Amino acid sequence: MQEKRKLERFDLEIFTKVKPFGAESDFMERGYTTSNISSSGMYFYTEDFLPVNTSLSIELYLPVKSNKKKIDANMTLVKIDGCVNRIDKQGMAVSFDEDYKIFQMQNSCFK
C-alpha cells in the first residue's frame, strides 16, 4: 500500500494536553503521549474517544536541550488548535491548524 501522507511523520513520544471546544466541553482536559507527530498533525493512543471533526485546544510540551544557545527554560510549550480527523480501535488522529504559539517554561511542572 502506498503512503498517502505528504509530510514526514516522526515516532516521537511527546506529552500533550487535549481539551475539546464547544459541545464536548464536558470531556475534561486530559494528558496523552503522542505515538507519532508531523507538522500537520499527531496520533495518540487512547480509550477516551471524541467524535470526528471535534475542535480541540492542544498543548505540546517539548523538552529543551541546547548547548548552542543559552535558554533559561527546560520546557517549551506549543499551543495549537486542531481537529479530530480519524479514530480507530487504538486511538485518535488529530490535524493541526496553521496558527500556533510557542512559550518557554521555567520549570517542568504541568499545570
Image: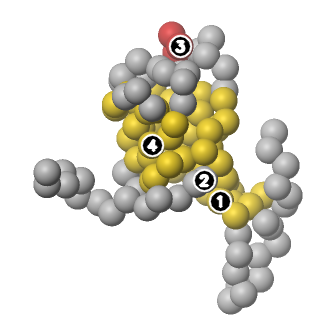
Between the C-alphas of marks 3 and 2, the distance is 24 Å
Of the image marks 1 and 4, the number of the one nearer the N terminus: 4
Picture coordinates of residue 99, whole percent (x, y): 45, 48
**Residue pointed to by mark 3:** 24
Measured in 3D between alpha carbons, the distance from the residue under mark 2 to the one under mark 1, in whole angstroms, is: 7 Å
**Left or right side of 38 for 68:** right
> How many residues crowd mark 3 within 10 Å: few (<14), some (14–19), many (20+)?
some
Gap between marks 4 and 3 measured at Cα: 19 Å
Q: Looking at the image, do the residues carrying marks 3 and 1 touch, with CB atoms under 8 Å apart?
A: no
Residue 65, horizontal then vertical, whole percent: 71, 75
Q: Mark 1 vs mark 4: give the one in front.
A: 4
- Residue ID for mark 1: 62
| Label pair 4/3, CB-CB below 8 angstroms | no
Q: Which mark is residue 14?
A: 2
What secondary structure is marked by label 2? Answer: loop
Nearer-N-terminus badge (4/3): 3
Residue 101, position as x, y percentages in the image: 58, 52
Q: Amino acid at mark 4?
A: Tyr
The amino acid type found where label 2 is placed reads Ile
Per the model, the C-alpha gap separating discs 1 and 4 is: 16 Å
Image quadrant where residue 46 sits: top right
Residue under label 4, please give it.
Answer: 43
